[in-house]
Image (spheres, coloured by chain):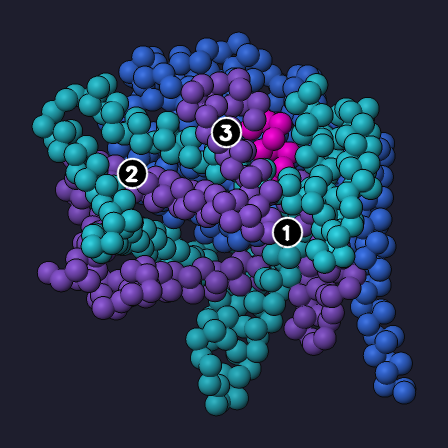
Chain colours: A blue, B cyan, C purple
Amino acid sequence: MRWLAIIALVTAIAAGIWGTRPAPRAGIAPQVTAAHAAISDVTAGELLVLAVDIDPANVPELSPFVRLTLDLALMRGAQVVTLSLTPAGAMLAERYLREALVERRATYGRDAINLGFIEGRSTAVHITGLPLQRTVTRDHAGNAIGDLPLAGRIQRLSDATVFVVAASGTPGAGEWLMQGQGRFAHAMVIATSGAEGSELVPFFASGQLAGLLGGARDVSAFADLAANDPRLYGDPGAVDYLKRLAEQMRAQRWAHLALVVCLVVGQGVYSWRGRRKGAK
Amino acid sequence: MIGQLIGLLLTFAVLSYVWRDNPLYRSAESIFVGVALGLFATFELRQVLLPRLWDRLALGPATGAAWVAVLLIILVTALMLARFVQPLEWLGRIPVAVAVGSLAGMAAAGFVRTVLVPQVGASAASLLIDDALAHERSVCLLESQPPNALTNIVCSFGPYLNQLLIFAGVAAGLVYFVFSRRENKGLQAVSRFGGWVVMVTLGVTLGFMAMAHFAVTIGRAQTMMETPGLALIALAIVVLALLCLKRDPRKGV
Amino acid sequence: MTKAGAPIVCAMVAATYWTLEPVVDVARDGWLKTFAIDLTIALIAVITLVAIFGVMVRESGKIARRESGHLHSTLTLVAFAMTLAVGLAAGPASEAFTWIFDYVYAPLESSLLALVAFALVDTALRRMRARSAETAVVIATAAIVMLGRAPPTNTAGTLLTPVADWLTRVPNVAGQRVLLIGAAIAACSTLLRLLLGVERDYLGARRS
């Protein structure tokens, strides 16, 4: 029985990745539309802070969102600061930021900086409310903050127009929400893995979050919206992300179907054995 | 290419656990623990302690306050190391106590500001404040084009019924958790309804979690498909290694 | 102040500061806030390093005593030493450290989490049973949400996606609010116990 389950899953994933028929549309949730609107509304010169607290395991789910957010912000001439509550997040933020700067022809230090890993979990969020020059001395690469032109133009990170959090696990969305939301005037958008997605819906419903993405389906919908932006339309990077997300959603539907079939078969076997025992 | 091959070898070594627990999987797990701890130690030393203690003096204004702050930090963290000296072991509890107290205070303040007040308020206010309901009605009508009599009825009353259900669900759910002894029939009925609401919530969470876990596995599969030749070589190496490993009946490997 | 009392008083002072911080101006900004943040961050960093050091000492002990699994402990120590050496010498932004992160840490972490999907499907087939009405509701809701968020066909999408979205936006919001309010009450209760000196688990096994 165990091998049946494993074969079902492997077949489902392979069928999804190798398949060519597009997955049926699952609609765009209002929290995704709101997230896209909040990020797209950032204009030239405004500050967008992106907290990258994802693990390598959640890269397939969340990295397209991180890259597209960076692309949208840099294309509009916004100032971007990335930071992380986890070491892995800092490494990933550095990679995505450097890639986005090359593709959008922006300059590190002038248009964007990566503050890197900030230890302290909940305490680290409080740093965003204090003067930047007083609380952070070096960026992820080890450059002195005073040597970076963008850092000189920022008083506090909490002055950001929009605060975007891409997080999975702990520390992550919970810390930014509990300590940052409501204290500072900026709008907050959270993108998280599916495991936490359902837990944060009440915060969007109450108006505390300007947007919310919970899992691959929402990220796929966000990518569809972002790819329709006139400046990103036909962009090779965006097209590549759309292709990978399309593969992901195709494989997801077959994997979910396999799981539901396993649930039904398992329940059927259990009921049949129960009846046989009763008959005996 | 070597890096990609190593990554794929490690991937298949871990996935070999699906077949059975084996030394290759345990080795990969051990390497992961070592690398993860090394990653954390590197960041704590180079990105946290060094900038905070040294840079603040070297790069920032070298004022008296900066010196006091730095020296106090060094003192308190040195107390942490006092726990390894038997007569001074009690001093080592002070830094832990400060950390626990700080995080508990922050957590409680955060929960009150972000959860208790806004969430309880939203549950009640959504029934009374018309703006949010009006927005939901307009979204509902937009999504149900072309409109007809049924959609008009659904969109007029639907948002209000949803908010009423949320309010009732929150109240009943709290009764379900708070009242362990439900002597009166009314309380029992409310508690049962709250229990159903919590069960549906758990079901939704399980559904979301399934997508998250599948996304990780699908991502790994996509990585393998990027370099299929290397993936096949890595798979062949791992399979050969597993076949060559001696089976020890005592250890089950 | 006794040896037992000092940590308790320190915990009370720290908890009081962070509880009042949102409402007291002098605590919210200025040198006191910067000092409190620096202190908490440095403490967490040192506590983490001491914990890592403790793990390495334990693994070294296993190797020295040639206990079962000492070869795996050797692998752990070697991996730790190499990562730390590269990280301290070249820095986290260097090519060498990034290589270790991209080709060793990331594949291992992703693959370990990828195993959960296999466990999930296996559990669904062999262990998840609707033995009562409550578990039937949990399983049925999960199935509707899964098929609604990633529908296998257009028809399933038309039928199940609105239901899945409604379940997420209405009963799920109600249930999550209940859980959040419960967690908030628990956090406040822990704080109160700390402030009154009743909570002493963080002091370890010896409590006086």
Relative to A152, residue C104 above or below: below
2 and 1 marks in contact (CB < 8 Å): no
For mark 1, give the secondary structure.
Answer: helix
Task: Give the SS element for disc 3.
Answer: helix
Chain letter behind tag 3: C
For image coordinates 45% across by 79% down, the residue present is B179
Give residue A47's position: percent from left, percent from top: 39, 24
- What kind of residue is marked 1? Phe
Q: Which residue is mark 2?
A: C42
Q: Is residue A11 visible?
A: yes
Question: Looking at the image, is C107 positioned above or below residue B138?
Answer: above
User: Could you say which disc has been placed on residue C83 in the image?
Assistant: 3
Query: In this rendering, would B211 be left or right of A40?
Result: right
Q: Main secondary structure of the magenta part?
A: helix
> Which percent across, then down, holds residue C39?
24, 40
Instruction: State the extent of the magenta-drawn residues as a range.
Output: C101-110
Residue C102 drawn in magenta: yes
Residue at (58, 37) in percent of width and height: C75
Left-right relation of C82 to A278: left
Q: Is residue A156 at least partly visible in the picture?
A: no
Q: Amino acid at mark 2?
A: Ala
Which residue lies at the image location 15% right of the left edge and 29% below the top edge? B66
Q: Earlier in the sequence, mark 2 or mark 3?
A: 2
The chain ID associated with circle 2 is C
* Residue identifier under label 1: B208
